[in-house]
Amino acid sequence: MAVTKKRATPRPRAAALYPDAHCELDYQTPFQLLVATILSAQCTDKRVNMVTPALFERFPSPRALADAPLGEIEELVRTAGFYHNKAKNIQGMARALVEHHDGEVPTTMEELVVLPGVGRKTANVVLGNVFGINAGVVVDTHVARLSTRFGLTRETDPVKIEQALIPLFPREQWTILSHWMIWHGRRVCDARKPRCSECTLRDICPSAAA
């Protein structure tokens, strides 16, 4: 019987490399992280963190955001890009929280993904980082890129990438896994010019430059 060699993964060394890895969006409440994550679509965390202080000061609760003039929300989130849709989504999300959840952020994937502007990625961010619920793996552009480069999957669709990663890692590591990969993607494994010569994971990476 042929023995299949178990593929090495970046998990153990990534934990040592990034012991302080965490969500780099600034927030104090589940609601704030939910808003910030919606705003982070096609936008850097740094930019979102520049936008949200004024937004949360002006509209500190779901009720306040739900009742706000849409134009005022748009002005506050303008620099996060796609501000018309993002303003509409965060207000729609806030209204749904008020109408269906007494202003509280729900704690299940099923309840979160039906909120305006919320998909699996956003739901996983909130569940894992606020509530400590490992419902899945956050797949952003960094996680998608590194998953391919490390040979963990050939899938390109975020949901299929998540499905491929889930059986490779223990459930209790699903949330931190995305942080390890995001931190490595931002600091070493750049999209255009990965710094393979500086990467301590190159010996287990099939995409490492010779």
Image: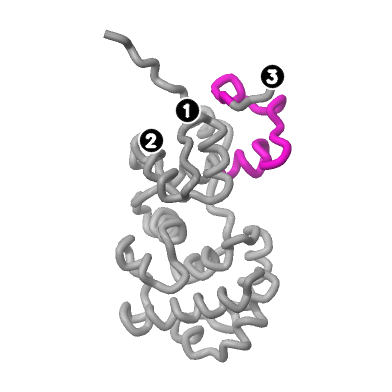
Upstream in the sequence, badge 3 or badge 2? 2
Q: Which residue is mark 2?
A: 169
Indicate the secondary structure of the residue bearing disc 2: loop
**Amino acid found under the numbered disc labelled 1:** Thr
Question: Residue 72's spot in the image, x, y percent?
Answer: 62, 87
In the drawing, does residue 49 fall left or right of residue 126?
right
**Judging from the image, what secondary structure is the residue with disc 3 in?**
loop
* Disc 2 and disc 1 in contact, CB within 8 angstroms: yes
Give, as a three-letter code, the residue at label 2: Phe
- Marked residue nearer the N-terminal end (2 or 1): 1
The structure residue drawn at horizontal position 36% and vertical position 75%, both measured from the top left corner, is 104
The label number, if any, that marks residue 9 in the structure image: 1
Give me the C-alpha separation between circle 3 and circle 2: 28 Å
Q: Residues in magenta? A: 182-206
In this picture, is 70 found above or below 7?
Answer: below
Residue 58 in the magenta stretch? The answer is: no
> Badge 3 is on which residue?
210
**Image quadrant containing the C terminus:** top right
Identify the colour scheme used.
Answer: one colour
Residue drawn at the location 47% of the way across and 70% of the way down: 117
Query: Disc 3 and disc 1: Cα gap in Å?
Result: 19 Å
The x, y position of residue 107, in whole percent, is 32, 64
